[in-house]
Image: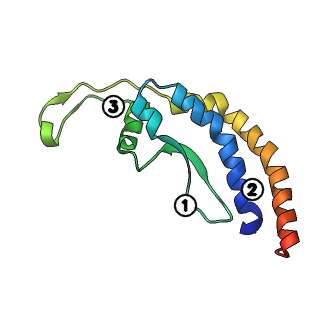
Amino acid sequence: MAKLYGRPVDEASRFALQPILKAAKANTEHASVKKALVLKKNRKAPKTQPSHLVGGDPKNPDYRLLHLLELGTEPHINAGRFAGTQHPGTTAQPFLTPAYEAHGDEAVKRFGQKIGPAVEKQAARLAKKGGL
């Protein structure tokens, strides 16, 4: 099963999520956010249930700040180096949520357009090799 669906699902998912990734990058003016946003595969997911997402690249140090920009922060008392000082909070500057809301349906359609022919192609390839 994994042989039949792994590669086609990976390709279809990457294809389908491109509009969301592009829109999320277009929704922010922060260059560091644009660099940190990537399309990635969940390597821990079972091979029969591949999972892809648009999010922060852990190799980029700015990925740790994406949720703070997306959701904003409440006013709070700082700890650590600035212990005891008051942080005024920040307003949310969403970039990923609007991208998903605008292009989520399109992603589903693009996935459907790509997955059918890709599965048929992979099945034919495996049948030719004697893998099915």
Q: How many marks?
A: 3
Give the number of the mark in front: 3 or 1. 1
Q: Could you tell me the amino acid type at mark 2?
A: Pro
First in sequence: mark 3 or mark 2?
2
State the separation of the CA atoms marked 1 and 2: 16 Å
Q: Is the N terminus in the top left, top right, bottom left or bottom right quadrant?
A: bottom right
Q: Secondary structure at mark 1?
A: loop
What residue type is disc 1 on? Arg
User: Where does the C terminus fall, quadrant-wise?
Assistant: bottom right
- Mark 3 and mark 1 lie on one chain; the one further toward the N terminus is 1
Mark 3 → mark 2, Cα distance in angstroms = 40 Å
Q: Are marks 3 and 1 in contact (CB under 8 Å)?
A: no
Nearest to the observer: residue 99 or residue 10: 10
Q: Residue at x 47, y 26 (%)?
A: 28
Name the residue that disc number 2 marks.
Answer: 8
Q: Position of residue 93 (x, y in %)?
A: 43, 25
Q: Identify the residue position indicated by label 3 in the image.
A: 73
Q: Which mark is residue 43?
A: 1
Q: Quadrant of residue 121?
A: bottom right
